Amino acid sequence: MIGYVTVGSNDLPRSAKFYDAIAAEMGVGRMMEFGTFIAWGKMGGAPGIAATKPFDGQAATVGNGVMVALEAASKEQVHRLYDIALANGGSDEGAPGPRGDDGFYAAYFRDPDGNKLNAFTMTGGD
């Protein structure tokens, strides 16, 4: 149902560097690009993510309680995505590790504009 999720950016070149690195780890690249909008993913594939300068010309702000979850292929990829995020201007919101007792393994981070993301995988409770 979801085609892509959009996060606001006040510095699109900075966002592009951050999301280019995240997308590369996930095996995709840019699928759409305009002057104020870039989307990453694969046409016809899983939902993608986009960064955009707000259409109304106002500053981009972070939604409280809003988060984009990126499905990783393994615990190792969760760690790589977390490390890539921090190396590309992101900030820590929760180091990689198990959450709860049902096999949910995740890391939480923010992009350079403060948008919250996580990388997760379901491990089957191991």
Image (spheres, grey):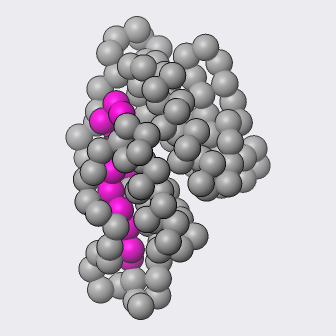
Percent x, y of residue 76: 50, 71
Percent x, y of residue 31: 71, 36
Q: Going by the picture, which residue comes out furthest to the front?
A: 87
Q: Is residue 116 left or right of residue 121?
A: left
Per the image, is 109 magenta? Answer: yes
Could you say which is closer to the camera, residue 126 or residue 101? 126
Could you say which is closer to the camera, residue 17 or residue 119? 17
Q: Is residue 122 left or right of residue 109?
A: right
Could you say which is closer to the camera, residue 123 or residue 17? 17
Q: Which residues are magenta?
A: 104-117
Residue 67, visible in the rendered structure: no
Per the image, is 110 magenta? Answer: yes
Residue 71, visible in the rendered structure: yes
Q: Going by the picture, which residue comes out furthest to the bottom?
A: 126
* Image quadrant where one finds the C terminus: bottom left
Is the stretch drawn in magenta largely helix, strand or loop? strand
**Residue pictured at 69% horizontal, 30% vertical:** 32
**Residue pictured at 65% horizontal, 18% vertical:** 34
Percent x, y of residue 29: 68, 42
